[in-house]
Image: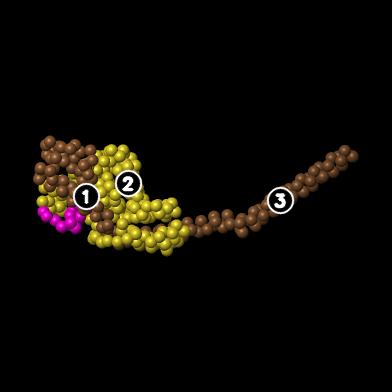
Chain colours: A yellow, B brown
């Protein structure tokens, strides 16, 4: 669901009701991007709130050259990555292997033929088990279609470094899904249910 | 080439052969195992792409809290902008400017008169002292 241009225009004029409508239409998407980048529900909710406050100031700069959803993903990712940086500073780490994890051995059942939807669920879990540095790249590139150049800029790394991370992340994800090894994730809580909007 | 070397290229191969040496493609033509591996990368890529349209359910309070916060801020921001725009509106700005100019002119006139009065008082005192 993309946001109707009339709602965007009303938001640009500062109409409070239009903003409420915008939140209604997009909050699931914003939360999903944040959750996939951050890997835990509390941070994802915080980042969602912050994203809308940023959007309030930035929406006048939206020119409609890209789809609104693409622009929204960019704003959300930028807020989420700032939050990741703050978290890394707080914990004193920013390595690719960061985030000590708990074992969740039974969530992924490797070697089993799975339906695509089930595979999607397994990938969501495996994504959370990826170290932050890998997760951000694979989420931004392979799910949300950011360019490697854009990812590099967001993360403060070169395009080449982003590419290397992406390939390693894909390799790890594939290994998690196809090899028999315990899956480790940073936060064992999952979103309550799934839906579409 | 060895399986191991070929597999190093596979995470990138999903997006096309790219800079992979020709031997990788040749190997893939004959090696079922490596082809199956490439297939699992392709499947992973397809499912990942599909996830963009799958949303996760946020906490139930999120929509209400965010909507309230953002609409309140939007209303405040709109009021500030409206105030600023009113000040730049010629129908408001011209009379306001005239009023300010009149006020300044009035203040200058009053100050001038006071100075004049003080000067004439000083003159009278000096002449009285001279006569005494």
Q: Chain of mark 2?
A: A
Quarter of the picture containing the N terminus of chain B is: top left
Which numbered marker is on residue A81? 2
Residue at the location (18% across, 40% down)? B9
Q: Is residue A115 magenta?
A: yes
- Residue A53, by quadrant, is bottom left
* Label 3 and label 1 in one chain: yes
Nearer the observer, B113 or B129: B113
Tell whether position A65 is magenta: no
Which numbered disc, 3 or 1, marks the residue that appears first in the sequence? 1
Q: CA distance from mark 3 to mark 2?
A: 57 Å
Q: Secondary structure at mark 1?
A: helix
The residue to which callout 3 is attached is: B105
Question: Which subunit holds the residue at mark 1?
Answer: B
Residue pointed to by mark 1: B45
User: Of discs 3 and 2, which sits in the foreground?
Assistant: 2
* SS type, badge 2: helix
**For the residues marked 2 and 1, what is the alpha-carbon distance in whole angstroms?**
23 Å
Q: Main secondary structure of the magenta part?
A: helix
Does the CB distance between marks 3 and 2 fall below 8 Å? no
Looking at the rendered image, the quarter that the C terminus of chain B falls into is top right
User: Where is residue A106 shown, x and y percent of the image?
Assistant: 13, 53
* Numbered range of the magenta stretch: A112-131
């Amino acid at each position: 669901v993309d946001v109707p241009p009339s709602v965007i225009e009303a938001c640009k004029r500062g109409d409070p009701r239009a903003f409420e409508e915008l939140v209604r239409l997009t909050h699931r998407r914003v939360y999903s991007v944040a959750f996939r980048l951050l890997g835990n529900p509390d941070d994802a909710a915080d980042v969602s709130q912050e994203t809308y406050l940023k959007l309030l100031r930035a929406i006048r700069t939206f020119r409609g050259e890209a789809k609104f959803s693409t622009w929204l993903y960019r704003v959300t990712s930028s807020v989420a990555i700032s939050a990741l940086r703050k978290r890394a500073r707080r914990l004193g780490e920013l390595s690719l292997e960061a985030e000590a994890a708990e074992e969740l051995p039974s969530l992924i059942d490797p070697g089993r033929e799975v339906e695509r939807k089930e595979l999607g669920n397994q990938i969501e879990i495996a994504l959370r088990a990826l170290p932050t540095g890998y997760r951000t790249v694979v989420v931004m590139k392979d799910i949300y279609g950011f360019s490697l150049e854009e990812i590099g800029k967001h993360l403060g790394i070169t395009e080449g470094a982003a590419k290397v991370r992406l390939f390693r992340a894909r390799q790890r994800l594939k290994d998690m899904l196809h090899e028999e090894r315990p899956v480790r994730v940073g936060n064992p809580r999952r979103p309550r249910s799934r839906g579409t909007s | 080439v060895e399986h191991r070397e070929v597999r190093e290229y596979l995470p990138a191969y999903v997006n096309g052969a790219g800079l992979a040496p020709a031997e990788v493609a040749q190997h893939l033509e004959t090696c079922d195992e490596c082809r199956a591996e490439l297939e699992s990368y392709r499947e992973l890529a397809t499912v990942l792409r599909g996830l963009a349209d799958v949303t996760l359910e946020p906490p139930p309070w999120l929509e209400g809290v965010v909507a309230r916060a953002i609409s309140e801020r939007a209303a405040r921001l709109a009021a500030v902008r409206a105030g600023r725009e009113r000040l730049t509106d010629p129908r408001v700005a011209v009379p306001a400017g005239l009023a300010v100019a009149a006020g300044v002119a009035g203040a200058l006139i009053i100050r001038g008169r006071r100075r004049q009065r003080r000067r004439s008082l000083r003159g009278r005192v000096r002449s009285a002292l001279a006569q005494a």
